[in-house]
Amino acid sequence: MAVNLDIIILIPMAVILVALFFYLGWQFNSRIGKKSLLSAEEKAKQIIADAQKDANNIKREKLLEVKDEWYKKKVEFDNEVNQKRQKIHNLEKQLTAREENIEKKFDLVIKKEKETKEAERELHEFKKKLDVRMQEISRIEAEQNEKLEKISGLTTEEAKKMLMENMVNQAKTDAAVVVKEIHDQAKADAKREAQKVIVQAIQRTAADHSVETTVSVVQIQNDDMKGRIIGKEGRNIRSFEAATGVDVIVDDTPEAVILSSFDQFRREVARVSLERLIADGRIHPARIEEVVEKVKQELEEDMVREGENTILQLGLHNMHQELIRHIGKMRYRSSYGQNLLQHSVEVAYLTGIMAAEVGLDVNLAKRAGLLHDIGKTVDKSVEGPHALIGYDLTKKYKEHPIVVNAVGSHHEDIEMEHPIAPLVQAADAISGARPGARREPLEGYVKRLETLEALAKSFEGVAKTYAIQAGREVRVVVEHDKIDDVVADKLSHDIAAKIEEEMEYPGQIKVTVIREVRKISYAK
């Protein structure tokens, strides 16, 4: 009974304990669930916040990418617009030039019409005078007839015959005088018109003719490079022309820029400099001056090497270094359109051949032939015949007396003292006289441009002078600290007046005085 009682007591207690544990477990699970739920909500909030941050970052990145892409497109569009504007500007210039040409031609036609009307008026007046003259002759004839009839007592037929003879003779005399006057007037008018036509023809064709012999062509990759060569408002092309003294022609010629100058050395400096600037891509005034100066130095060195190669080619030796440099300068000189270095080498060979035939010293003969025109390479400021200038130059650098005499006497400015001298003279004549060797007009053209530059440079305060446009314009660069703007204006008129007084030339010459002030500082 006691056992049963204990069992009965234990069962409720066990049930109560199970219920208690169940309750406690339920409470524990509820609290843990709430905490998990709270933690999950916090995590969800954190994930949402992170997602929003990532979305904002992605949004900003995309906005930046869009802005970059927009800026690139804007730059491309601006470049394209600028290129089109430059092309339009060039076309406007061309149209303006064509309009000016048309206006000039129109003015010329109007002038010709006025001259024609004036000539018709003069002819009409002359016809009136002639009619008056004929009436006077008729009146005199009638008076003579009356007098003759009274004085001579001739028959009518005889008097008529005599009067007719007198009338015919007088008419012939008067007609001859009139014809002579007309003929003389026609000759004078024809001469004046011929001179006018010739001057116009020279003006229109001078540049075209000079292009054939005084230009270099620089090839470029594309026509867009022309805009960079010109630069903003033309500052690059102006700096290039001022630094080189060469006229730069940028026209419709595809993928080409033309350099024009009568001075071969300047033109070569400009050609090499422009090619380097195009290859480098940096084209601005400071870079242009730097490259031009460097190219000048390099070409000076090349001239020395050219002189050394020439004397080696001829088998000569022991020549002064300064003479070798002058021989190299011959490469950039011409004599009547014939390259001076080629001409001198040809004369050296011819003199050597003739000296060998007559038993003279071949080396001295070649030496004299090579140096005979060395005076043409000396600066233009030295006055005198080139033969005497070469004589002084070779004597100064201790050349052999036979060579010195041959150089000075090849144009008979001094007496020939050795048989080699007449050989040099003969070889010079042979080289210059062979068919196609020389072009006299080109030499005269170059001399005229050199004279034009020298004349403009003779004024005080002038730093540089460049003859361009086939001699129709001379650009004068003055020293800004010596010449102010007022004096520069007067200087242009003075130079123009001196050109008119001392030179003969077709058409007109434009004098452009350039005064440029530069201020330079260095940041250290």
Image: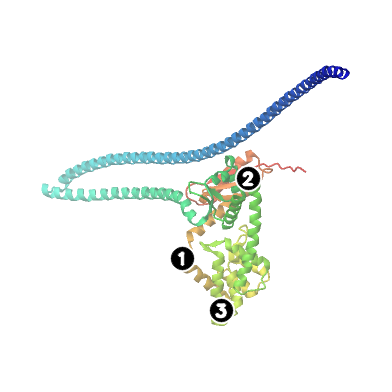
Please give left or right for residue 351 compared with residue 4 in the image.
Answer: left
The one of 145 and 182 positioned closer to us in this rendering: 182
* Residue on which the image places disc 2: 284
Q: In the rendered view, would you say 45 is above or below 425?
A: above
Residue 45 visible in this rendered orientation of the protein = yes
Contact between labelled residues 1 and 3, with CB atoms less than 8 Å apart: no
Residue type, mark 3 in image: Ala
**Residue 299 appears at what percent x and percent y?**
63, 59
Residue at the far front in the pictured view: 1
- In percent of width and height, residue 73 lies at 57, 36
Q: Which mark is residue 355?
A: 3
- Element at badge 3? helix
* Residues at discs 2 and 3 in contact (Cβ within 8 Å): no
**Residue under numbered circle 1:** 436
Q: Please report whichever mark, 3 or 1, sits nearer to the chain's N-terminal start.
A: 3
180, above or below 48, in the image: below
Mark 1 nearby-residue class (10 Å; few <14, some 14–19, many ≥20): few
Q: Residues within 10 Å of mark 3 (few under 14, many from 20)?
A: many
